[in-house]
Amino acid sequence: MHYKPVRTVLSTASRKLPIALPSKSSGNVTALVFNTEDELGDRPFCNYLVAGTARGEIHVFDIPSSSLVESFKGLLPSDAPVTSLSIGPVWYFDASSGQEHYQHEFIAVAQSKNASVLSWDVRFPAGRRLLAFSSVDDAPGGGPLQEVSYDCSGDNLWAFDIGSQSACQWRCSTGKLIRAEARPAELAAVRGISCSINWRYTVVEYATAGIEVFDAWGATGGATDYGLSVYENTAGDVPLPSALAVGSLGYVAAANGTPGAWYVELTDFVGHAPGLKLPTADEMTALAFSYHGDLLAGGGPGYVIVWVVRSGTERDRFDIR
């Protein structure tokens, strides 16, 4: 069984950073995530895309049927955009049988200053799937929080606090912060961080501009060791993307442009194929790759687009009102 490892991409609290929060326009999509594909024999088939908005709403879409599964409105603070999401199964180990058994799904949510976990059962009918909801203490550095993850077996919630440049750990049963580990002062400050769902690649966006991709298969250990650096772009003329994501096939997706001329650019940093530019009508404020890296989702003002990565063709479009 595999869960997202603890990412100690961490910091100095005294450093002042240019923090760019997503737009708060009504219905604007500010975070996206596809579900993991953990192997549990009794887990129902799941192929979901979860979207968070600037007003704290959560929408769950089923990819095979191209349909909305469920929406959560009024559950989270409406004055803070969703900045990061993760989704996966909660399970327990039966010592007598030596088997892992599925219980339900979790949806971990980070906002600008707080984080939450929704316990959600896909086996129940729509409107009755929410089993429990818990939230944790405010971020010590004022956020925004990014790269949220949940260790359901240990009841721990993790996120990276951009404001304090620290990796934070909360205990969900108490809602209390139990650890905050600072990123060393000699390392460049982080503006954004995102991992591929298969946890191999990590893309780091630095506050001084530029991005770097690390391969965890080359990690040797240490609090700030993401692995082997496999791609770096630190040119000063590279615009800061409005959204950034990394996929398991070796692509970085970055949203850039100007009003009326936005696009998502895919950079193939392992040389599988030439990069692509995907034009969009509006600014993309969230990006996410699927578990296998074959799909890319982009969120904008009131909608989500899903592209096929290899061809750049549009597969689905979901409206969020």
Image (cartoon, rainbow, N blue to C red):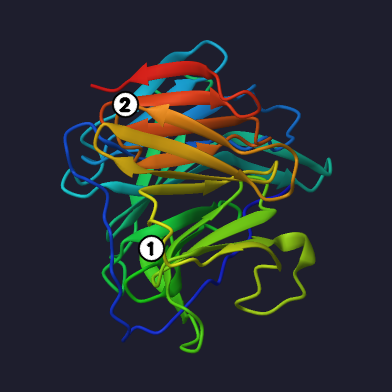
The amino acid marked with disc number 1 is: Thr
Residue at (72%, 37%) from the top-left corner? 273
- Secondary structure, mark 1, is loop
- Secondary structure, mark 2, is loop
On-image quarter of the C terminus? top left
Question: Residue under circle 2?
Answer: 281
Return the x and y of residue 12 as percentages of the image width and height.
40, 84
Taking the view exactly as shown, the residue that stands out farthest to the top is 65
Give the vertical position of 262 relative to 65 (above or below): below
Residue 154 in sight from this viewpoint: no
The amino acid marked with disc number 2 is: Ala
Question: Residue under circle 1?
Answer: 174
Return the x and y of residue 201 as percentages of the image width and height.
65, 55
Count residues near mark 1 (Cα–Cα under 10 Å), then give few for <14, some for 14-19, many for 20+: few
Disc with the residue nearer the chain's start (1 vs 2): 1
- Tell whether 122 sits left or right of 225: left
Nearer to us in this view, 31 or 208? 208
Residue at (38%, 22%) from the top-left corner? 70
Taking the view exactly as shown, the residue that stands out farthest to the front is 237
Work out how far the residue at label 1 is from the one at label 2, CA to CA, in angstroms: 44 Å
Residue at (83%, 40%) from the top-left corner? 97
Give the vertical position of 244 relative to 218 (above or below): above
Nearer to us in this view, 276 or 205? 276
